[in-house]
Amino acid sequence: MKYDSELNIAIEAVKKACSLCITVQSSLVSEETMIKKDKSPVTVADFGVQAIICHELKKAFPNDPIVAEEDSADLKTEEGKALSQKVFEYASKVLPELKEEEIHATIDSGDYDGGPEGRFWTLDPIDGTKGFLRGQQYAVALALVENGEVVLGVLGCPNLARDLEKPESHKGAIFSAVIGEGSYIQFFEDISDKKINVSDIDHPTLAPFCESVESAHSSHGDSKQIAQILGVTAEPIRIDSQCKYAVLARGDASIYLRLPTSKDYVEKIWDHAAGYIIVKEAGGRVTDILGSDLDFSLGRTLSNNKGVVGTNGELHDLVISAVIEVLNSK
Ligand code: AMP
Ligand code: MG
């Protein structure tokens, strides 16, 4: 299979990263830090994950550049010393060969600008940091882009339940997709994987939709109006991070709305690349709010797109018309 070794390396790297996240969350996120909204746990995990995944990618594919969210500037300051030491402590539990001196440079290997030519990886070490801090959903998101096209994606979702109705049931899954090969789920406790498909719902009244927990990231008011036009009766499924794409890809939701809350916000490629291919390979569609394909060839951002609409495919045109109707009426 094409991209076989890339897929194996990416899955293993994301699994290692997820175990760091789980350790950090269980040892650092006390109720107290959550109440105080102390960002340090998520910062340690963010840097630690970026170090681990960039290290694994550089070892396997030394010539592949990486577009990742973080850089090491904060770790290099005098005030950042303690944080840097903590990142090393946690990262070396997962990857003992990673030395402290390597960490900053490894994190900074994610500084590539992206673009239309050649291939590069894109990484969001912890997507959904607010969900991580609340002890809810977050994702480690890694994708490979070749000549502007997403060709492989892996999403690690440590807190995602096997059954959304039972939030504490069998948590943790890796979702993956390679172009032309379909999408798969592998539960943390299993070694085998299972093909996933979007729902086959063909009427919007039956279609649950998902959106951000944070209304600053996606307008809840607009989605409510869109749901009314479509006749969607179910309450929105609100979850942080690219877990929304995962939930759409496995058919728990049939629509994902990310509706701009400001004129100026530009979506980042690492916030969408992995989820985008996982939904598409599961049979769904992903576009921006006007129905245009997402363009990953323009650098670190999706500068030609506004917002995101994902669906099971069947419902896409209907949903886009409702989105346009609501946005035009404003
Ligand atoms: P979610 O968990 O889906 O709400 O999305 C989390 C991501 O939203 C973060 O990784 C941020 O990069 C991104 N983000 C930050 N501000 C905004 C905004 N104003 N609109 C949309 N996304 C945003
Ligand atoms: Mg993110």
Image: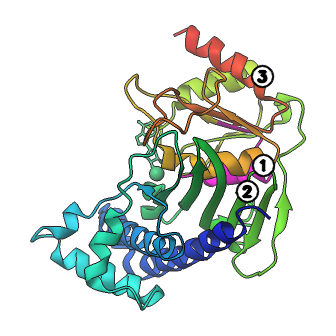
Front of the two marks 3 and 2: 2
Q: Which quadrant of the view contains residue 34?
A: bottom left
Residue receiving disc 3:
317
Numbered range of the magenta stretch: 241-256
Amino acid marked by disc 2: Val
Mark 2 Cα shell of 10 Å, populated few (<14), some (14-19), many (≥20): many
User: In screen coordinates, is 95 left or right of 10?
Assistant: left
**Alpha-carbon span between mark 3 and mark 2:** 25 Å
First reached walking from the N terminus: tag 2 or tag 1 = 2
Q: Name the residue that disc number 1 marks.
A: 281
Residue at 90%, 41% (x, y): give it: 200
Find residue 307 and report its horizontal and vertical position in percent.
Answer: 54, 30
Q: Can residue 148 be seen here?
A: yes
Q: Amino acid at mark 3?
A: Asp
Residue 240 is one of the magenta-drawn residues: no
* Circle 2 residue: 178
The residue at 23%/75% (across/down) is 83
Count the marks: how many?
3
Instruction: Answer left or right for 204 relative to 110.
Output: right
Disc 2/disc 1 C-alpha distance (Å): 8 Å
> The residue tagged with tag 1: helix, strand or loop?
helix
> Which quarter of the rendered picture does the N terminus lie within?
bottom right
Check contact, mark 2 vs mark 1: CB within 8 A: yes
Residue at 64 percent of width and 71 percent of height: 11
Q: Give percent across and percent down for residue 157.
A: 61, 65
Q: Amino acid at mark 1?
A: Glu
Cα separation, mark 1 vs mark 3, equals 18 Å
* Vertical comparison of 157 with 101: above or below: above
Q: Give the image location of residue 166, x and y in percent.
A: 73, 65
Residue 73 on image: x %, y %: 21, 61
Q: Earlier in the sequence, mark 1 or mark 3?
A: 1
Q: Residue furthest top?
A: 329
